[in-house]
Each structure stands twice: as C-alpha cells, then as structure tokens.
Image: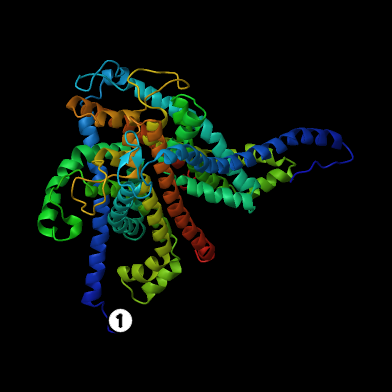
Amino acid sequence: MATPVRTRDGGSALSRSASRRSRGEVPFRYASTGAGILLLAIMAAIAVFLVVEAIPALQANEGNFFTTLTWEPNSSQSFGIAALAFGTLISATLALIMAVPVAVGVALFISHYAPRRMAGILGYVIDLLAAVPSVVYGLWGVIFLVPFMQGPSEFLNEYLGFIPLFGGDVVAGRSMLTASIVLAVMILPIIAAISREVFLQVPRMHEEAALALGATRWEVIKTAVLPFGRPGVISASMLGLGRAMGETIAVALIFPATFGISLEILTPQGNSIAANIANGFGEATPVGRGALIASGLVLFVITLLVNMGARMIIARRKEYSGAAA
Amino acid sequence: MTAIQRISAGRRFKDRFVQSLVYLSFAIAVVPLVAVLWMVIKNGLARFDMEFLTHSMRNIGAKDAGGGAYHAILGTLEQVLLASLISIPIGLLTAIYLVEYGEGTRLSRAISFFVDVMTGIPSVVSGLFILAFWILALGLPFSGLAGALALSILMMPTVVRSAEEMLRLVPNDLREASYALGVPKWRTITRIVLPTSFTGIVTGVMLAIARVAGETAPLLLTVFFTDSINSDPFNGPQMGLPLYVFDQAARPTDTAIDRAWAGALTLILIVMLLNLVARLIGWWRSPARGR
C-alpha cells in the first residue's frame, strides 16, 4: 500500500498530489469487490427466479411432476419430467461413451505423438471445432447425418438386434443414437483440450524415468502419463457430460420429440429437457411456460451438481500436484 | 548390443497398435470438422448473395425464394454489442478483485468457485432465467436487451477466467516498482497492470464474444422471433442470426433450407473472423515472437 510520504521540503506538494490521486482508491476497490459480489448474486438469482416462476405451474399440475410420462401443460395441465430427464441422461451418457476415448486419443496425439511444431496448430484445429456454433451442428445433423444414419442403423438393428439397445421394430435416422453422435462431436473438443493440458503437466522426470527403464512410448503413457492424468480426464469428462446435458438447439432439431421411456436407441423416439424447452416454448400458455421453467430448474440442478463435482476433483488435484508439476 | 535386450515383438506390437489408435482418433475428430465446414460452404454459397445480406424476411413465406437475413445480422450485432458492454466491465472488475484485492480471502474463493460453476450453466437455463426474471417477473417485453442480458450471463465467467489468467501473468516486480514510486494501488492497476496484460485480455474477450455470438437457445426465450427489421434492441422482438438458422432449418422447404445454410455460413464467417482476430492479437504480442 502506498501512503503519501511527508518530507521536510516540498513534501506538502507531493502529498497533496498523492492524496488527490489516491482519492480513486476506495471507489475502485468497492467497484471491483461489488462486481465479484454481483456475480454471486446472479448465481443465487438464477436459482431463486426459476423456483419462483415454476411454483404456480407446479401447483396447477394435475399429474405427478416426477413420475408422469406425458408433457401436456397447455391442454390437460398434466406434465412430468421423467421421460425428459431419462432422455437427457441417456443421450448425454451415450455421447460421453463415444467422445471420451476419442478425446483422450486426440489429447495424447497432441501432447505425446505429434511433432512439437505441429502440436500448437493441431490444438488450434481442435479449438476451432469448439468454436462452431451449436445451431450449425444441428443443421448439419438434421440435413446430413439423419438421412446418413438410416443405413448404419438398419445394419445394427439387423445384425445386433438381439441386444436390447439396438432392438425395436422401426428404425429411423431421427433417433437417440444420431442425437448422441452430434452431442459427442460437440463435447469432444472440451474433453480433449482439458485432457491435453493435464497430459502436458505430467512431470518430465516421471516420463524420463520410465524411458530410462527401457519403456516403449505406450509403456511410458501407461505407467506415467495416464495415472497422473486420470483425475483430470475424469473431471474433463464430467464437464463434457454437463455440456451434453445442457445442449439445446442441435438436439432440438434432431430429436423426434416423443414422450416415453425406451432403451431402443435406433427407434424414432427421444427427447431431452433442453430440446423440449426449445421446441415447446413457442406455443406455451402461461402454465406451459411455468412448466418449462420447472424443467429448466431440474436441468440447472443436475448440471450444477455435475459441474461442482468436476471442479472439486480439479481443485483437489491442484493442491497435491502444485509442487510436483 | 549384447548387453541391452531387444524389445520383444509383443511389446513392439502393442506400442505400434496404440500409436495407430491415437492417430486414428485424431483423424476421427477432424472428420466432423471438415464435413461440417465443407457442407456449410458448399450449401451456403447458393444463397450467399447481396439480397441475402440486405433484405429481411418480411412477407416471404417458407416456399418463396429470395428473402434474407439482414434483420438477423443486425439483431445479432446489437445483441452481442450490448452483451459485451454489460459483461466486459463486470468481468474485468471481478478479475481485478480476484487477483489484486481478494487474494486468499473466503469471498474470493467463493467467487472463483462459482465463476467456474457458472461456466457450466447450460445456455438454455440462462435464457430461462432472463425469461423468469425480466419478462415474467418484471413484465418487460421480449427485446434485444433481454437477449443481451442472457448472453452476458454466459459471457461473464469466460471474461473473468481469461482476464484473471492474464492479470496473474503480470510480474509482481512491476507492481512493486510502481508502489515504490508512491503510486496508489488503483493507479498501479489501471496504468501498469492493465496495459501490460491488455492484449491477452483482448484475446480472451474476443473469444468470449465469438462464443456467445453463436448461442441460439437463450435468444429463443428472450428475443423471440420476427421476420421484419427491428433496429431498436430495447423494444419488441428482434431476430438473431443463430435463431434465423434454427427457424429456417425447421421449415421443410428447399428454399428455407438454402436460407438456413446461407445463414450458417454467415454465422461461421463472423465467429471464425472473431476467433482469427483474437488469435492474431495474441500471437502478435506473444513472447515467442521476441517482443
């Protein structure tokens, strides 16, 4: 902290100008503290206002919010989150299963396989993938991927139909699987970027020790890189899961918007909380809007828990890797 | 070579096998990027003309040819500008608090944690919040400003994170030298710390802008739709470019789909341009270039 210094000669002039200049100190400090507190207040306000606006609709609900399978808040005032929550979880989980192995491969490629000079550029290419707006993926999904998936879906259904996941009588391109693939493409860059960061932090000594013992590149990765990076990959996957569950527009264009619970991912069925909000908002009555807000509240809570879990894993790792990294 | 045993065939095979898997996964990751960009460029160019850039959709049905996205481009620019005006000062001040004032306090740890959590808020939830707060509770109309508020909720945490990272890179020696000259703390921050990290912050802010420019869901709930030009972001429904693409893509005619592709191309051009400028600013001042 700078306090004006008084000297015997000329001190008054110095201190006068110094005090005039430090007059901004207190407001500036308050402004920056206030901005921080404002952010906390916004987070709290999000929860409060979603609850407040959801309550009237929940009171008007004639079904059970947690078990009713239909969503008819506009006509019969009966709606339930079960089918939507199920679709959200299944599509996000499928996307995660597809995206994580590829993302870890990409991260390893950039951190340990690609030539040093190329690594930066390749990382940038992956970041570009993240920069493509979700509505563009949705457009691509609905125009290209939906018709394209018809063939592979029929193939899976024909030869692997005995597995319940691929079973069902009618197969369509507009299915849970197609939506999950688009979600996987969208969350891949996030998971890859965080995993790459973690893999680059692996202590050089660990890798060189493994190399000195005669390990091949794969053995170095297996013994030094992956164990060190595991918490990072896990939390990156959880962040990706949160992103996949909240993704709206791309899946709103692809999901056939049905209400039901079925594990047959190739049949024309599927919906998610976010997609239902985007598709149902236009013709919603006041009760319908309240119902959509209630479903958004559920989505908010789920993603909040997933993200907080991911952040805690990262934060814990920071503590013990600080000295070693 | 007798002392060192050769690597057995099995270990060598495993090594090669994993290597090809890693190469393959990178190829798999690049395929969608190339496929999306190629399709957007190929299909988007069909309607990417002057009429598209200068006309709205007023009195144009789904089946009619022609029409454009002028109203949507205008709306997006205004909404993103407003969102930036709201979130950049707040985000920057929060980052300053975290780095310069709050270091180690309980409040700063709480803010830091919730900024991270806020990054993960689904975009549709930020739209629902503004719908519940601004439109339903306060009774204000759908407008570009409401959309900008929803976008700024998504933008703030990104700005805070990137600015915080950049402020932490400023060497403490600079701050101490300034204090030693009797410069008060706030003048040190505005005259020494911020200018030093200026380009890094600009890069982060540009990336944040590029991210929210492509968001659709919050606009859907706060800006609503219009086919006409509404240049006043404070009053009445507006359009946004992502919303335009979503709207046209949901119509089942070829002319509408063509407009959707052209809109997607315009959107990608805007986002990529922002990204490129951000990276160029970052590269221009990066230490690797010897500055």
Q: How is the image coloured?
A: rainbow
Whole-percent x and y of residue A98?
27, 55
Identify the image quadrant of residue B258: top left
- Residue drawn 26% across and 19% down? B67
Toward the right, the furthest residue is: A8
Q: Is residue B205 visible?
A: no
For residue B137, above or below residue B154:
above
- Residue drawn 14% across and 46% down? A150
Drawn side of residue B180 relative to residue B198, left or right: right
Kindly identify which residue carries mark 1.
B4
Whole-percent x and y of residue B63?
19, 22
Q: Is residue A240 visible?
A: yes
Whole-percent x and y of residue B104?
63, 54
Whole-percent x and y of residue A170?
13, 48
- Residue drawn 46% across and 45% down? B119
Drawn side of residue A152 relative to residue B112, left or right: left
Q: As shown in the figure, which amino acid type bears the numbered disc 1?
A: Ile
Nearer to the camera, A20 or A298: A298
Instruction: Report the number of numbered marks.
Output: 1
- Residue drawn 26% across and 63% down? B19
Toward the bottom, the furthest residue is: B3
Toward the top, the furthest residue is: B59
Nearer to the camera, B225 or B18: B225
